[in-house]
Amino acid sequence: MTPGELRIENVSVAVAGRALVHDACLEVAPGEVVALAGPNGAGKSTLLRTLYRARRPTSGRVLLDGEDVWRMGGRRLARRLAAVMQEPPGEFELTVYEVVAMGRSPYKRAFQGDDADDREIIMDALEALGVTALAQAPFDRLSGGEKQRVLIARALAQRAGTVVLDEPTNHLDLRHQLDALRLVRDLGVTAVVALHDLNLAAAFCDRICVMDAGRIVADGPPAEVLAPALLAEVYQVDAEVTIHPRTGLPQINVVPEPRRRTSL
Ligand code: ADP
Ligand code: MG
């Protein structure tokens, strides 16, 4: 898996005259892990969709190793870029093993079965996400967090040098949040990860890119980006940023507003 180099050049996405993403530029060096943060509706998922070709940019380009992903064959792109989407495709009448095995399809011809190498890659991916015991379970019956881990395992089995993950820690418990992000970081692949938890972003990502109302409004190392003024502006919260005494990482504490009295 050679980590890819990703360049998002002036990407805009408009639907019915409304800009969901406006003039986004982002460069991700090989092996770099970039968090994509920002409020609900900021355009994170829309921007990520342009990378894995689920939504065509209205203007601008997405380049993977200098090649426009929108001009690449589907299988070729899938061997180099794997995606873990926010909305898991529903109605999977497949077992967990079969879902993870789908990660091997870009390497196969139609109806070609899994060989020993494929099976080893699939078993390794199941193991890495701690879902080996669920291998024969129907995907549809899993909990949200289990599904999420299976979909990460599928992306892992794809053996792509670049991964795009849309809120992969959604539904995961604390332990599995850390495990999933550590796994992504330790793969040595290029990664763009939409994340709401800024403390996790600071712990596992080289950079944090913040979107607000369709635009990229900040991009830099966590310690630079995570400033109270930016958090106040983008999220409209009062947040304190301290340095964690044990990790040396920026640590965000949102100060809740005092509870209002409601009289009935
Ligand atoms: P985020 O992932 O940051 O929460 P999204 O990219 O999902 O944000 O959405 C950005 C904005 O675009 C939202 O206001 C959303 O309602 C809107 N949006 C997303 N998809 C569509 C669509 N297919 N048609 C119209 N509006 C959309
Ligand atoms: Mg989203």
Image (cartoon, rainbow, N blue to C red):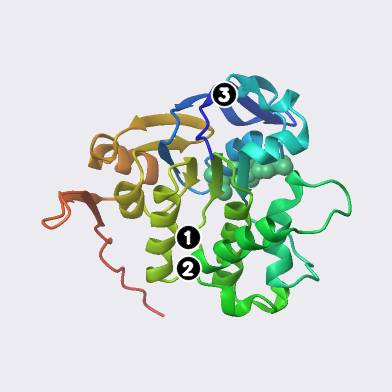
Q: Is mark 1 within 8 Å of ligand 2?
A: no
Query: Please, what is the three-letter code of the amino acid marked with disc 2?
Result: Leu
**Quick one: quadrant of the C terminus?**
bottom left
Secondary structure of the residue carrying tag 2 is: loop
Q: Quadrant of the N terminus?
A: top right
- Examine the rendered structure and indicate whether residue 196 appears above or below residue 99: above
Please name the residue shown 56% across and 61% down the image: 125
**Numbered badge on residue 169:** 1
Task: Please state which amino acid type lies under the numbered disc 1.
Answer: Thr
Q: Nearer the viewer, mark 3 or mark 1?
A: 3
Q: Which residue is mark 2?
A: 172
x and y, in percent, of residue 12 in the image:
62, 25
> Measuring 36% from the left and 74% from the top, which residue is drawn there?
262
What label sits on residue 65 in the rendered view?
A: 3
Q: Residues within 10 Å of mark 3 (few under 14, many from 20)?
A: some
Query: Label 3 amino acid?
Result: Asp
For marks 2 and 3, give the one nearer the viewer: 3
Tell me if label 2 and label 1 are in contact, CB under 8 Å.
yes
